[in-house]
Image: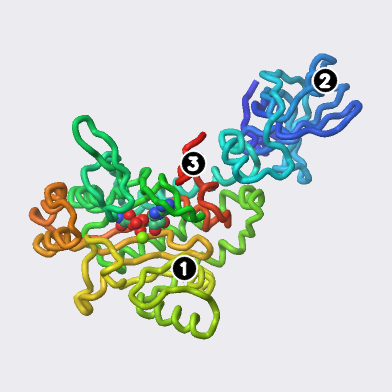
Amino acid sequence: MQNVRIQDLSHHDGEVVRLRGWLYNSRGKGKLLFLLLRDGSGICQCVTLKANVSEEDFLAAKGLTQESSMEVVGTVKLDERAPGGAELQVQSLHVHQVAEPFPIRKKEHGPGFLMDHRHLWLRSKRQMALLRVRHRVISSFREYLDQQGFFCVDSPIFTPNACEGTSTLFETDYFDGKAYLTQSGQLYGEASAMALGKIYVFGPTFRAEKSKTRRHLTEFWMLEPEIAFADLTEVCDLAEGMLRYTIEQILERNQQDLADLDRDPEVLKGWNRDFPRLKYDDAAAMLMKWQADGSYESDFKPGDDLGAPDETMLGEHYGCPVMVTHWPHEVKAFYMKRDEEDPSKALGVDIIAPTAGEIVGGAVREESYEVLKARIEEHELPLEAFQWYLDLRRYGTVPHGGFGLGLERTVSWLTGVEHVRECIPFPRTLQRIYP
Ligand code: 4AD
Ligand code: MG
């Protein structure tokens, strides 16, 4: 007997196969039962006719509760009206367990309750769809970078120094000393790029964010390509190319998931275009104008970092991801190279996406030993811990750059799911470390 996954059912029309999964829902009475079975790849309607199965099996089918685990054998029948395009005409079933009453029902539950039951909530239609889109985003990034000749290089999680400012560092005991959980793999990415030319780091990153916004996690996944000999344009082109490839892949391969998320594919199609690129000064001028004419409210003034309302405003105005470049160096990290034409500006780029805000932060890196050393001192960072990083500027330094893309914010943007806590299987936030 062939075990088949629901996503592949349509290739098995007329065959007798076995499905293995959990009861999502059931209905029917008398001599006919419709069992909705889910196996993680989809949901299939298993039509159980009393006349077609043993008495014992029919009784068992009637006693199944939500999330009961089982294996079902039956004949595949293509049917356009069936969810997923095929149904199973059941011949026999084997129950692994009749589940206890499942805590998550069709009725509305509050976010606190759902988050406390995250380990079970993952089985709901929308959460499964989100997990599958998240998977597609990751695999698309990897595919794209692989096609472009990038090598994946892993960076450590225990680190001796800060990368993105000292205010959000998680400190931990490390035998007789201290270590920090990584905020970004970038510095190690730079070292690796000097070895392999084009690399990316992809892993969990940690920030002791005290903020409770819908865009902040304390543990999130970041994808960080780094390219030797690149300038800002090349960095922007890579980010845009990768995101557009990802949109195409989702549109092609996650149609059912988009439907489960009530996400109109047309919205995603509309973003598969050249992303507008503008300098910070121009963005700031637009924001000031919108504040003056009452289009939105914000404390923002030129020179400031963008806040959530400013990002929202820009995202709404363009209706697609926009790239903001040439930032006041004061609001950006120590490692960013300054613009030769205007040294008050850092050669950084943020990509602001509609509703999700900043999904990417990138830059050209300072490549001069003297300048970088001075920057580390200016930022009052411990020189000792950065010796190895400075070495990169002593042994064959080259212009280079890269970016960090926040995975959960990107998934939130693409799916239209507001809160990043739903875009990672088990979120970690200021208030939550369970389950
Ligand atoms: O802009 P950030 O801080 O950039 C860096 O860490 C660079 N070292 C990356 C690099 O150039 N290799 O963070 C990059 C992205 C942000 O744009 C955002 O999408 C995400 O990481 N991010 C967060 N996502 C969820 N929760 C948080 N607390 C986040 N902080 C940053
Ligand atoms: Mg940033």
Q: Quadrant of residue 3?
A: top right
Residue 435 left/right relative to 234: right
304 or 43: nearer the viewer: 304
Residue shown at the point (41%, 63%) measured from the top left = 240
Residue shown at the point (54%, 53%) measured from the top left = 419
Residue shown at the point (52%, 65%) measured from the top left = 354
Nearer the observer: mark 3 or 1; the answer is 3
According to the image, label 3 marks what residue?
432
Above or below, comparing residue 159 to residue 99 in the picture: below
Few, some or many residues within 10 Å of mark 1 (<14, 14–19, 20+):
many
Q: Which callout, 2 or 1, points at the residue further toward the start of the chain?
A: 2
According to the image, label 2 marks what residue?
58
Few, some or many residues within 10 Å of mark 3 (<14, 14–19, 20+):
few
Q: Amino acid at mark 1?
A: Glu
Above or below, comparing residue 52 to residue 354 in the picture: above
Above or below, comparing residue 243 to residue 291 in the picture: above
Label of residue 311 in the image:
1
431 or 322: nearer the viewer: 431
Label of residue 139 in the image:
none
Q: Whole-percent x and y of residue 400?
A: 22, 60
Q: Which callout, 3 or 1, points at the residue further toward the start of the chain?
A: 1
Q: Whole-percent x and y of residue 78?
A: 74, 39
Q: Quadrant of residue 330?
A: bottom left
Q: Amino acid at mark 3?
A: Arg
15 or 314: nearer the viewer: 314
